[in-house]
Image (tube, rainbow, N blue to C red):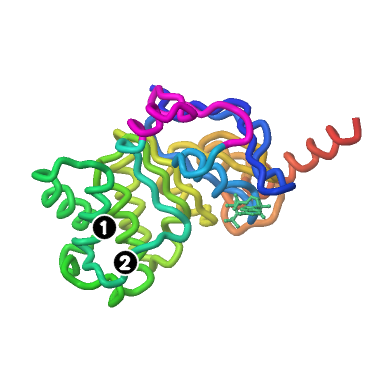
């Protein structure tokens, strides 16, 4: 089932075009969003999370047009979102903060304690549930962010650089969680870590200059890397650079026509 349906999406920040003519259909699974700095990953995730409005185009989430306020309100309860820089209340405990987010997502009060306990356990913070968020390390705060994003068992989960600040062991555990979530939800993960994509994603979308440069699977990107002589220490990294370069060449050709 297609849970994210985007057509002709354009997002502008002042005079700068952050996304241009983006068409995207995403269904159940883990979708890696890759691209260089400024490619438009955060702009896309913010539009999908319904926190930013597109300048043009149509965005349908779980069958609802998000331009319609009623559609947007219904969909927000079924979404999970971890922003790149997420705000939290340092004086709250982990449990209090995740419960507060559960309340914002309108989870019925009698279901909140169990939902919070499950989300906190899923990110490996059960033993720190009653610690104040300000006493946690950066990686742990990131995990609190992931816990609040999954507390409502979202059907669409949007994670903007979730592995930033996680140590290698936590990253491995997080990939396991991603695979588990992607079995039933549509998960979009932006990352600079190509190895996260290779390990946990079912599909890859590569953005460059606000446009889609490549879509495929980690396997197809790896194959592209194996057949190209571009730079990179791993075939999928070589695939990433090869796809980017091919896209840039095509764009230049287009511009010359
Ligand atoms: N609030 C803003 N005001 C002005 N320009 C912006 C703003 N937010 C983003 N941009 C510009 O829009 C473009 C896309 O930015 P975006 O943050 O979506 O990219 P990104 O792929 O997430 O980058 P990164 O990998 O660095 O996080 C960039 O050129 C950026 O400079």
- Identified at 17% across, 63% down, the residue is 126
Q: Where is residue 160 in the image (x, y as percent from the top left)?
A: 46, 52
| Quadrant housing the N terminus | top left
Q: Where is residue 147 in the image (x, y as percent from the top left)?
A: 28, 54
- Viewer-nearest residue: 230 or 28: 28
Q: Give the range drawn in magenta.
A: 54-75
| Quadrant housing the C terminus | top right
Seen as rendered, the residue at the extreme front is 69
Look at the image and say whether residue 73 sits in the magenta stretch.
yes
Seen as rendered, the residue at the extreme left is 110
Count neighbours of disc 1 (C-alpha within 10 A) and say few if under 14, some if 14 to 19, many if 20 or more.
many
- Identified at 23% across, 72% down, the residue is 132
Left or right placement of residue 107 versus residue 60 in this view: left
Q: Which residue, given by chain and number where applicable, does mark 1 sit on?
A: 123
Q: Which residue, given by chain and number where applicable, does mark 2 sit on?
A: 89
- Viewer-nearest residue: 168 or 184: 184
């Amino acid at each position: 089932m297609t849970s994210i349906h985007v057509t002709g999406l354009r997002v502008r920040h002042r005079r700068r075009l952050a996304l241009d003519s983006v068409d995207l259909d995403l269904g159940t699974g883990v979708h890696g969003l890759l691209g260089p700095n400024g490619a438009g990953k955060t702009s896309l995730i913010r539009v999908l999370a319904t926190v930013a409005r597109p300048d043009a185009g149509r965005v349908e989430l779980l069958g609802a047009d998000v331009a319609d306020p009623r559609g947007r309100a219904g969909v927000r309860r079924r979404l999970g979102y971890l922003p790149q820089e997420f705000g939290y209340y340092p004086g709250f405990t982990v449990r209090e903060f995740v419960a507060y987010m559960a309340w914002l997502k309108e989870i019925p009060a009698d279901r909140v304690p169990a939902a919070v306990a499950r989300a906190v356990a899923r990110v490996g913070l059960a033993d720190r549930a009653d610690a104040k968020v300000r006493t946690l390390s950066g990686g742990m705060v990131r995990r609190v962010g992931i816990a609040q994003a999954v507390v409502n068992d979202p059907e669409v989960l949007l994670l903007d650089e979730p592995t930033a600040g996680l140590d290698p062991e936590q990253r491995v555990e997080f990939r396991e969680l991603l695979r588990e979530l992607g079995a039933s939800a549509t998960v979009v993960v932006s990352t600079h870590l190509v190895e996260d994509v290779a390990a946990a994603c079912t599909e890859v979308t590569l953005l460059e200059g606000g446009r889609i440069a490549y879509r495929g699977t980690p396997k197809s990107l790896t194959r592209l890397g194996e057949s190209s002589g571009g730079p990179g220490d791993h075939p999928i990294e070589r695939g990433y650079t090869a796809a980017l370069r091919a896209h840039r060449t095509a764009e230049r050709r287009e511009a010359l026509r």
